[in-house]
Amino acid sequence: MKTRLRRHAVAVAVFAVVASACGASSDGVVEDANGDCTPNPPASGPVTFGDGGPGDSCEHASDCSSTCCTCASGGKFLAAECVGGSCADEQTACDDEQKLFESQGISPCQ
């Protein structure tokens, strides 16, 4: 599952970049996480996060710091999102990235 989620995270990131080029104003990234919300595997995966906090200027989600998202099932994932040139707040990043995955038939919460 971890490898599958990572592959889909890359696909989602690519989709977000393509959507951004087509006029959409949102770019997001997701990484599978352990129970303590550390990246799984630690920062060696294809997803990297920046250090921008909510409201900070960004061009891509990778400019924004990650937030720990907790699912109703207890699963966790890390997410970041750049919306309209600003890093999204925690709730927005978690909700938007989870909805994007679920729209593709994938749950980051498993």
Image (cartoon, rainbow, N blue to C red):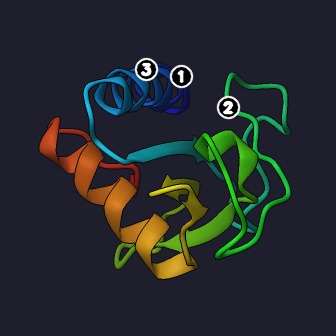
Q: Is residue 12 above or below residue 64?
A: above
> Decide: marks 3, 1 in contact (CB < 8 A)?
no
x and y percent of residue 107 in the render? Answer: 29, 48
Closer to the camera: disc 3 or disc 1?
3
Q: At x 75% / y 36%, what residue is drawn?
A: 48
Q: Which sits in the foreground, 29 or 60?
A: 60
**Which residue in the protein does label 2 denote?**
47
Closer to the camera: disc 2 or disc 3?
3
Q: Quadrant of residue 89?
A: bottom right
Q: Is residue 44 above or below residue 39?
A: above
Label 1 SS: helix
In three-dimensional space, the C-alpha distance between marks 2 and 3, rounded to whole angstroms, equals 11 Å
Label 3 SS: helix
Residue 14 is labelled as 3
In three-dimensional space, the C-alpha distance between marks 1 and 2, rounded to whole angstroms, equals 12 Å
Label 2 SS: loop
Q: Amino acid at mark 3?
A: Val
x and y percent of residue 23 in the render? Answer: 27, 35
Instruction: Point out the tag, 2 or 3, that comes first from the N-terminus.
Output: 3
In three-dimensional space, the C-alpha distance between marks 3 and 1, rounded to whole angstroms, equals 17 Å
